[in-house]
Image: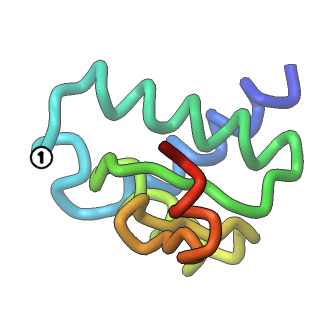
Amino acid sequence: MKSSVMCTMISDIMNNRPNECSKEPRQKVKVDRQILAIAISNKAKLIISNDKGLLNAARYLVEQQFKIQAVDVSEITVPVETQSTLF
């Protein structure tokens, strides 16, 4: 229930954003909002993704006083000492 309330709040905020829904298919926008709502309502501090739409939405929500950080997968570095034992 808390996630559905959060999703409604996020949708209200994001619907005021210019051209939000016309950039991507409606179903993708809905799923992105649901992902963000679940994360925020469960007090996640970080979203890691390679989905530009999801990251942009999360970064916009930070501007609206939501406390969640959005990081692209390509921005994460694995320490060299860990990499040598991966394979």
Q: Quadrant of residue 75?
A: bottom left
Q: Label 1 neighbourhood size at 10 Å, few (<14), some (14-19), many (20+)?
A: few
State which quarter of the image contains the N terminus. Answer: top right
Rendered location of residue 67, percent (x, y): 75, 70
Q: Is residue 79 left or right of residue 54?
A: right
Which residue is identified by label 1? 23
The residue at 80%/52% (across/down) is: 44
The residue at 78%/62% (across/down) is: 45
Q: Secondary structure at mark 1?
A: helix
The residue at 34%/50% (across/down) is: 50
Rendered location of residue 80, percent (x, y): 54, 76
The answer to whether 61 is drawn above or below residue 21 in the figure is: below
Front-most of 37 and 45?
A: 45
The answer to whether 84 is drawn above or below residue 36 in the figure is: below
The answer to whether 4 is drawn above or below residue 80 in the figure is: above
Front-most of 7 and 54?
A: 54
**Circle 1: residue type:** Lys
